[in-house]
Image: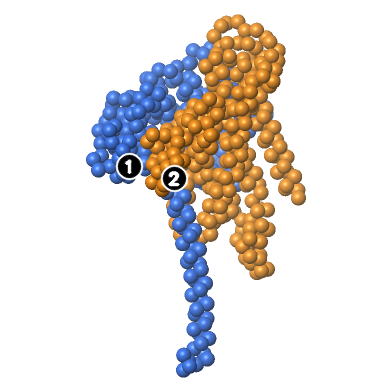
Amino acid sequence: MSFNQVRKVVGSYVFVAPAFLLFVTFSLYPFLKVFQLSVTNWDGISSSMQYIGLENFKDLWLDNPVFWASMKNAFTVTFLALTAQNFLALFLALLCDRDIRGGNVYRVIFYLPPVLSGIVVGLIWNWIYDGNYGLLNHFLRFIGLGDLARAWLSDAKTALIGVSVIHMWKGFGWGFVILLAGLQSIPRELYEAARVDGANTWVMFKNVTVPLMIPVFILVSILTILGTMQIFDIIISTTGGGPGYHTEVPITRIVSTMIGSSKFGYACAMGVTFGLILLAISMVQIRVSKMMRQV
Amino acid sequence: MSRMTSTHVVAEASRAEVNYDLVKKRAVSFFVHLFLILVSLSCLFPLWWAFASSLKTQQTVFTDLSFFPKDPQWSNYYYAWAKADFSRYFFNSLLYTAVVVVGVVLIASMAAYAFSRLKFWGKNVMFLVLISTMMIPIPGSFIALYVLLNKLHLVDTRLGYILPQINGGLALGIFLLKTFFDDLPKEIEDSAAIDGCGRFRTYWHIALPLARPAIAVLAIFNILAVWNEYLLAMLVLSSKDLMPLQRGLMVFQGAHITQYPLLMAGIVITVLPVLAVYLLLQKHIIKGITAGAVKG
């Protein structure tokens, strides 16, 4: 090879080298390291660690009710986000899909909560839910339902619903924007043709809108599930997992196992388990979506 | 009535029908807007409430429920900014956001350009591996990331907070910009090459300026992501001097749990830049999310 050719080949790698170096150091290495640490009893500080096989996994899967309770909590929030939040988003998107005055203004406003941080949103809602001075209690007393007033986020009965509402408030605008874009990509002629055939609004929704929107529905639900299962900022800025373990979620468990109890190996086993569960969920969703597309 | 001719009656009847349709349409539209406005208010209200509360005093904040405080305490902002460290957090956030965004744009665009235009061994495998981080969720890899930063003595340093976030923005950035470069006609670059322009100069002077729209989308997403980041800041940064706003808010709340007006002032300081970026660039943001979503 001539000097020029060598220079050219080396030059190409120079373009990708920074990206690749960062990726190997900060993505690939931690990814592999998590698996390695998950079979040790490392405490995060001492220079020695012992290989203990699947001990961590055995304890986690068979003997850690708090972790599975946190998983159940995340599933509860996810279920609410999938249903209530996404139906609201779809309903709003359908309303705005008609050529309505001020449609863009609504869109800008609905997407406002999603651009705020979970910390900011949590801290503001903390105060809305507050037992002594909270707006929600003031409002309930004002409309004569003062009996219902309580410290919403420190009451075991309402804490999880409370954080779910915050999460849905922050998230519905995101679903709305994607669903609206999906609706607007449906060619108008299809609706006109259906109308000529005498279809009413409901029939058009069922036979035109829904079939064409299925890929968008699936995308929105996959992203809703992955995003909601990994909820953290809103929890840490409101309940911190309490009262008791009533609003613990997998990420808060992993963080407190790691920082709180210095059980790095065990925390990695939690991360691997949680990652596998998320992977399984997305695989099922993709499989279902392929089946639906064939129908 | 009896004197009305038949044509009159028909005309009257059809006008009534028209009016009925119009009334129905107006009524539907009224309720649609009513509903949309109620939802909009629910989005705006908590923010306004935080702002209004930031202008009340420690004594009045729990009793004064007005939306427009009569005697606005602008001095709360002075205290939050100067005495409660929010100015420090603010400039840290600004620094982190600027460095990460510039880093992501430069590194991702270089890699994307190579993946789109240059030929080299292992190109496709490298591309797939880099993009895969976008698809595979690895919750818990932050544990190992922390371990790594510890080994590299990057815990509680600015660099330790910046580098992982640049890496975090690469997958989306490379994907977005490669797609953009692929759609770009090659002729201009080819003629530049014939004129003796080297590959790096072609990338820097020709491809990069042309990619401005895609870079804008990428930059906005990273601005929002870095400004709003919390988990990594919590793990990596423990000195107040290095903390960004989100971390600062949590520290302030932990130390002064009842100082609501100052906390709310801190929140407003945190939100204002996001709000400004969002309102100025909302068209790009919405285009960005929807393009990715509907195409993908």
Relative height, residue B14 to residue A106 (above, below): below
Q: Residue at x 59, y 32 (%)?
A: A74
Q: Is residue A7 above or below residue A186?
A: above
Subunit of label 1: B
Tell me: residue B1, above or below residue B219.
below
Q: Is residue A244 left or right of residue A2?
A: left
- Asked whether residue A275 appears in the rendered view, the answer is yes
Q: Amino acid at mark 1?
A: Leu
* Residue hosting label 1: B65
Q: Position of residue B39 (x, y in %)?
A: 47, 50
Across and down, in percent, residue B8 comes to: 49, 88
Q: Which chain is blue?
A: B
Residue, disc 2: A145
Q: Position of residue A62 (x, y in %)?
A: 69, 20
Q: Quadrant of residue B90?
A: top left
> Quarter of the image holding residue B187?
top right
Q: Colour of chain A?
A: orange
Name the one closer to the observer, A108 or A241: A241
Q: Position of residue B131 (x, y in %)?
A: 62, 32
Q: Secondary structure at mark 1?
A: loop
Q: Amino acid at mark 2?
A: Leu
For the residue labelled by badge 2, is the local secondary structure a helix, a strand or a loop?
Answer: loop
Residue at 39% across, 42% down = A138
Colour logic:
by chain
The CA distance from mark 1 to mark 2 is 18 Å
